[in-house]
């Protein structure tokens, strides 16, 4: 947690932004409640809501707050811990003490939140709240009579959180450095015959030992064509590619999110190297283009262009690259976007509304395959932190559907493409800070990424065993 002044200043900025938009009424913030797992006292691992963390920093369950835009008051609602709870949890600071760490001296019991909100509703005052992420808070918001998220509030929060403060960048560098160390441990554990699950255990053990844990469920798979494959029940097989997409969340709750793709056994086959080299070129090109004033949407399109041009050289597509881009052929190979915002969440603020976070007001989400899935399209601004994660995938179901529908049949060489069934997929991801001059990779030491670097690192891993 930062010092109280940071949270007071952030709330003051939010209030100013709301007032500049002519807003009145109250803003309601709901911190998360703890969630029972099998029975009431056996809970899922505690994680606070990220917007709450940003404005209040209080990392305790069942806290809420109301900012009154008209009266200028700020109140924290929570309950002091009763003796019967202290027996289980040990002594905890009072709500007044906890609220003071966030720079707030008005507190009330949690049940009084209902009064504060219903009083505002009865008086016809606007009640602003964001869309709650967790189901408990969705029910709580419904109970309170808050029926829709406030766009003006959500956009003001996004405006602030999209530009990371220096103190946040320092913590993100730390999360990324630890995330990179975690990835090195995973890479060193790769050997034909080992179970995927064993490597996941080593990787996640590091995250729990050095940070809060994982910033999202680990993807470690020899089926890279399945984007979020969380099943880890196979043994590593020589000749396969292993995609490791994993992020460590720091104790301060900042996320990292890296992906590397490795050849089982440490050497790429010629076909794997061909495709890998294209994805690598895309990652490097995207990074080189990342700069204030450039729309991430244009970088996604530039990457698509590279993929299609190189696929044409391999004989998998034919025709004019511009025409293929305009028809959405890139979406056959790269069906997801180039990247997303990252910060307190791996997909930062997407719970507030993906379009509000990832698109400038004058940008419209495309209908084209691939580009449609782009989560971050905005014109970049210094202080943005985004992932750079191009990929190429051979997804039999998708290719089969396009072929059956005769989609892009003038461009796609389906017969040749079918030779790639079983190849899997490749994704290469870094976390990138947009600076005033351009961009820099976050973290201490970039994970090996060029094909030769990867093979060399894996050779050293093997000789160090
Ligand atoms: N790296 C996982 C994701 O972006 O969803």
Image (cartoon, rainbow, N blue to C red):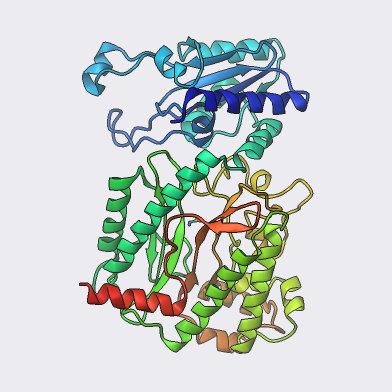
Q: Give the image location of residue 218, x and y in percent.
A: 38, 56
How far from the left and from the top, in percent, is residue 262?
39, 73
Q: Is residue 326 above or below residue 144?
A: below
At which x and y percent is residue 355? 67, 47
**Is 209 on the left-hand or right-hand side of 2?**
left
Q: Residue at x 42, y 12 (%)?
A: 96
Q: Residue at x 40, y 36 (%)?
A: 47
Farthest residue toward the front?
437
Closer to the camera in the image, 36 or 6 = 6
Residue 2 seen in this snapshot: yes
Quarter placement of the N terminus = top left
Residue 248, relative to residue 54: is it above or below? below
Q: Quick check: 146 above or below 163?
A: above
Q: Residue at x 57, y 39 (%)?
A: 165
Where residue 109 sits in the image (x, y, percent)? 45, 11
Q: Which of the image's four quarters has the C terminus?
A: bottom left
């Amino acid at each position: 947690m930062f010092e109280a002044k940071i949270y007071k200043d952030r709330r003051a900025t939010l209030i100013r932004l709301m007032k500049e938009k002519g807003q009145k009424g109250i803003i309601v913030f709901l911190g998360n409640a703890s969630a029972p797992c099998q029975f009431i006292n056996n809970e899922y691992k505690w994680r606070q809501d990220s917007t709450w963390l940003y404005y209040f920093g209080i990392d305790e369950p069942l806290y809420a707050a109301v900012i009154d835009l008209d009266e200028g008051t700020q109140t924290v609602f929570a309950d002091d811990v009763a003796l019967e709870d202290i027996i289980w949890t040990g002594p905890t600071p009072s709500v007044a003490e906890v609220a003071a760490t966030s720079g707030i001296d008005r507190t009330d019991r949690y049940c009084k939140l209902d009064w504060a909100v219903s009083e505002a509703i009865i008086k016809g005052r606007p009640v602003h709240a964001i869309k709650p992420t967790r189901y408990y808070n969705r029910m709580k918001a419904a109970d309170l009579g808050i029926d829709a998220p406030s766009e003006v509030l959500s956009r003001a929060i996004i405006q602030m959180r999209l530009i990371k403060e220096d103190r946040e960048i320092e913590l993100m560098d730390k999360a990324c450095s630890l995330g990179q160390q975690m990835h090195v441990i995973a890479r060193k554990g790769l050997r034909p015959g080992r179970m995927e699950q064993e490597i996941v255990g080593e990787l996640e053990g590091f995250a729990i030992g050095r940070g809060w844990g994982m910033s999202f469920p680990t993807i470690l798979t020899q089926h890279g064509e399945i984007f979020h494959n969380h099943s880890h029940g196979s043994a590593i097989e020589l000749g396969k590619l292993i995609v490791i997409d994993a992020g460590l969340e720091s104790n301060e709750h900042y996320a990292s999110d890296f992906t590397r793709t490795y050849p089982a056994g440490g050497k790429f086959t010629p076909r794997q190297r061909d495709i890998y080299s294209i994805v690598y070129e895309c990652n490097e090109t995207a990074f080189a283009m990342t700069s204030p004033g450039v729309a991430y949407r244009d970088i996604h399109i530039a990457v698509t262009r590279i993929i299609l041009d190189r696929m044409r050289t391999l004989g998998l597509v034919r025709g004019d690259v511009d025409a293929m881009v305009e028809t959405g052929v890139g979406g056959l190979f790269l069906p997801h976007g180039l990247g997303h915002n990252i910060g307190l969440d791996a997909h930062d603020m997407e719970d507030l509304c993906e379009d509000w976070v990832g698109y400038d007001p004058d940008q419209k989400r495309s209908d084209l395959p691939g580009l449609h899935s782009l989560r971050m399209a905005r014109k970049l601004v210094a202080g943005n932190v985004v992932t750079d994660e191009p990929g190429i995938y051979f997804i039999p179901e998708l290719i089969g559907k396009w072929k059956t529908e005769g989609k892009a049949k003038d461009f796609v060489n389906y017969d040749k493409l079918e030779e790639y069934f079983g190849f899997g997929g490749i994704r290469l991801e870094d976390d990138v800070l947009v600076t005033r001059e351009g961009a820099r990779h976050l973290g201490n030491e970039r994970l090996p990424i060029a094909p030769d670097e990867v093979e060399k690192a894996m050779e050293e891993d093997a000789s160090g065993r």
